[in-house]
Each structure stands twice: as structure tokens, then as C-alpha cells.
Amino acid sequence: MADNLSVEQKAQVGLIAAAIAKGWGWLLALGILSIILGTIGLGMTAMLSIVSVIFFGALLLVGGVIQLFDAFKHAGWKGTFWHVLIALLYLVGGIILVGDPVGGSVALTLVVAAMLVGSGVFRAIMAFQAKGAPGWGWLLFGAFLSILLGVMVLSSWPVSGLWVIGLIVAIELIINGWSCVLMALVGRNAAKALGGGAAPA
């Protein structure tokens, strides 16, 4: 597969590999920290859900202010009205989430559950359309798991709203942490191969 890369792509891959080899220690530390935080988060999903919703609400507020500022900065633009409307929606959503993070978590969980069920149904349809093709069974299995997870969340809603968001964030932290650890180990091996424990400048 590497033979199909252009000269520029090979050079870019080389630069990335050298950077990972040089900074593998920091990457390893980041991965371990992410795994630890994710593991802690698994034990306090309710608090993590609330913190995540507040953070998301704060992002919406910041985005709304920037959108509003940009709308008035380009007041002569034909789409100013829609620009302002989007900014106000951001601001209202941010205020609601920050003001009532528990209610926001419950509402977001309902959206997540609906997305899981919906995406599972669509993937199941795709699987049956590709029935007989290599891997269609795995696609159907993934669709079944997605629907099952969505139904499980819905069946315990609104109580599930207190832990689902936090659980997703915790799992994401753990997955990200292991990805960083594995990349760091690859970088360490590359650094050893290059000699001296670091990539050349």
C-alpha cells in the first residue's frame, strides 16, 4: 500500500513518523492520563454527564456570541437575518444547558438514543440490501447492537439521562488513551530503530 503513495505523501508520512518517534514519551503520558480519567469517569458517570453538558452549553454560548458579532459585522449581507437567528438559537441552547444541566443531559440522552435506533435501522436496511456480499453479516450485527443499545437507553429514560452522556465521554477517553499508548509504543520502537531514542531533525 505504501508503494501507491506519491513522493509528497511519503514525505508527509515520514515527518509524522519522525514526530511520533521524537515525542513518544509525551504521547504515552497523555494516553495513560486519558485512560485514568476515563476509568475514573466510569465510576462517576452522573457527575461527568453534568460537567459535559455544562461544557457543551458553554461552547454554544461562545459560538452564539461569535455568530452574533459576525452577523453585525457584516450587516449588509443578505443572510444577516438567518445569521442572527442561528446565533440566538446557539445562545438560547447554551443558556438552557448551563442553567439546567440535568434537564439538558436528559434531553441530549433522548436525542442520542433516537440516533442509535435510527442509525441501526438504516444500517440493517443496508445490510439486507447487500445480503450475500462479504461482510454483510457484520453490518447487520452492528445494526442490531446499535438498535439494542438505543432501546436499552430509551427503556430506562429519563433516568438514563443521568449517566449515558458521562458513560460515552468516559469510554471515549479510554479509547483515545489506548490509541495514544499504542501510537507511543510504535514511536518508541521507531526511535530505537533510528538509534539514540529520538528521530533525526
Image (spheres, rainbow, N blue to C red):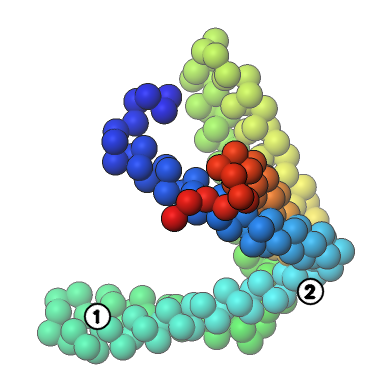
Residue at point 75%, 58% (across, down): 32
User: As drawn, which residue projects farthest toward the top?
Assistant: 132
Whether residue 190 can be seen here: no
Residue that badge 1 annotates: 81
Q: Which residue is at the front of the view, 82 or 32?
A: 32
Please, what secondary structure does the residue beneath circle 1 have?
Answer: helix
Residue at mark 2 to residue at mark 1: CA–CA distance = 38 Å
Residue at point 55%, 42% (across, down): 194
Identity, as a three-letter code, of the amino acid under mark 1 = Phe
The count of marks equals: 2
- For disc 1, the neighbor class at 10 Å (few under 14, some 14 to 19, many from 20) is few
Which label belongs to residue 47? 2
Is 173 above or below relative to 48?
A: above
Is 137 above or below relative to 173?
A: above
Q: Position of residue 120 (x, y in %)?
A: 60, 38
Q: Quadrant of residue 127?
A: top right
Of pointers 2 and 1, the one earlier in the residue sequence: 2
Identity, as a three-letter code, of the amino acid under mark 2 = Met
Where the C terminus falls, by quadrant? bottom left
